[in-house]
Amino acid sequence: MNHKFGLLPKVLLAIALGIGCGLLVPGWVARIALTFNALFGNFLNFVIPLLILGLVAPGIAELGAKAGRLLAITAALAYAFTLFSGFGTLFASLGLLPRMLGETTPVIAPDDGGGEALRPFFTVDMPPLMGVMTALLLAFVLGLGMARIRNGKLKGMMDDFKQIIERVIARVILPLLPFYIFGIFLSITQSGQVAGILGIFLKLIAVIFLLTIVLLLIQFSIAGAVARKNPFGMLRTMLTAYMTALGTQSSAATIPVTLAQTVKLGVRPEVAGFVIPLCATIHLSGSMMKITACSVAVLMLTGADISLATYAGFILLLGITMIAAPGVPGGAIMAAVGLLESMLGFDDNMIGLMIATYIAMDSFGTAANVTGDGAIAVIVNAIDGPRRAA
């Protein structure tokens, strides 16, 4: 019963209620919501390094344990497509968004004013055990180490820790997320910024949908050139997987359909059986596109400077960090929060807007990830084919 009312409807309802209550409720009610937001935001900051450590390290260990030629080819293609999506979206966003936003004055007020009425009643400090970059480096060291050594004790402990973190996300963070977004939109409405933000919100969804179509056309054109097949015919075949992913919002849940449609593209079953489940974890072009475009828009709304050098580092690290994304809606954005804070300087309000916008478009990104998996499988099949025949 509960599962039918998914995360996306809850987030949309939270936005609508936040706007409605922001127009009606007195300041002390808004401060109650902001007190919850302050506590939740601090808890999120505490959990993020643990999330990165608990999800990235076992993910890297799993990849290393399957070491082989096919793995290296698949991982390289998945990462290359993810980076291509990130940098392509960055330049497209920098070209398109300023024109769409016009001469917009910063719409999101910096988090240093707002008067007593828009302050929480109290906060509880929850310092994280380590910084985001420390957690990321430790995850790389542990993951690569576990892939090399044959002793399974540490791997077993990290797998258990991963299960704990996934439960914290699924049973604590995601259920409370709509309340957090409610508080953010209530606060934005009371400060008179909501009309500008909602207009940009809708334009951004349209831009990202168009960019996902362009991305898929490019991916399948490359696959078609390598395998000497019609890219439009392949895209038509993968449409079933695309539509399934729109409904499930999960790459993992769509694997059986993606697998069946990929075999119909002429990919050998043993290649498809290896590439598709792997790409459900490591190929995140659609997620990368959403996070990049949304973060550029949010930075523009705050009037912050956008550094290409900083963004390049952000995209390169994000492509690896998102491997940690668990198979739940919104997983990739949860894995990315640490980098948004540490590299792009996002505060709690900006993170809340990012999460709301991301989840509103979660279906498009997941569908792009899943459909692109078919293109990668076609390329891997073409590269591996001559060797098998020999």
Image (cartoon, rainbow, N blue to C red):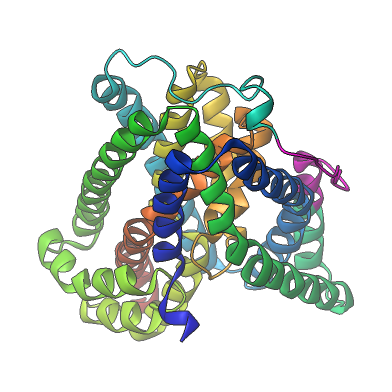
Q: In the figure, 103 relative to 373: above or below?
A: above
State the residue in front, 164 or 176: 176
Q: In the figure, 260 relative to 362: above or below?
A: below
Q: Position of residue 83 (x, y in %)?
A: 45, 42
Q: Position of residue 279 (x, y in %)?
A: 46, 66
State the residue in front, 185 or 214: 185
Residue pictured at 38% horizontal, 43% vertical: 85
Evaluate whether residue 77 shows in this view: no
Residue pictured at 43% horizontal, 24% vertical: 301
Q: Position of residue 146 (x, y in %)?
A: 80, 66
Residue pictured at 76% horizontal, 39% vertical: 121
Q: In the figure, 39 relative to 251: above or below?
A: above
All told, the count of numbered labels is 0
State the residue in front, 330 or 159: 330
Q: Classify the position of the C terminus by image quarter.
A: bottom left
Judge from the rendering whether residue 22 lies leftward or rightward of residue 163; answer left or right: left
Judge from the rendering whether residue 301 lies leftward or rightward of residue 376; answer left or right: right
Q: Is residue 132 magenta?
A: yes
Residue pictured at 54% horizontal, 37% vertical: 187
Evaluate whether residue 297 shows in this view: yes
Q: Is residue 156 magenta?
A: no
State the residue in front, 339 or 86: 339
Q: Main secondary structure of the magenta part?
A: loop
Q: Position of residue 386 (x, y in %)?
A: 33, 70
Judge from the rendering whether residue 58 lies leftward or rightward of residue 370; answer left or right: right
Quadrant in which residue 52 is drawn = bottom right
Q: Which residues are drawn in magenta? A: 120-138
Quadrant in which residue 92 is drawn = top left
Q: In the figure, 90 relative to 173: above or below?
A: above
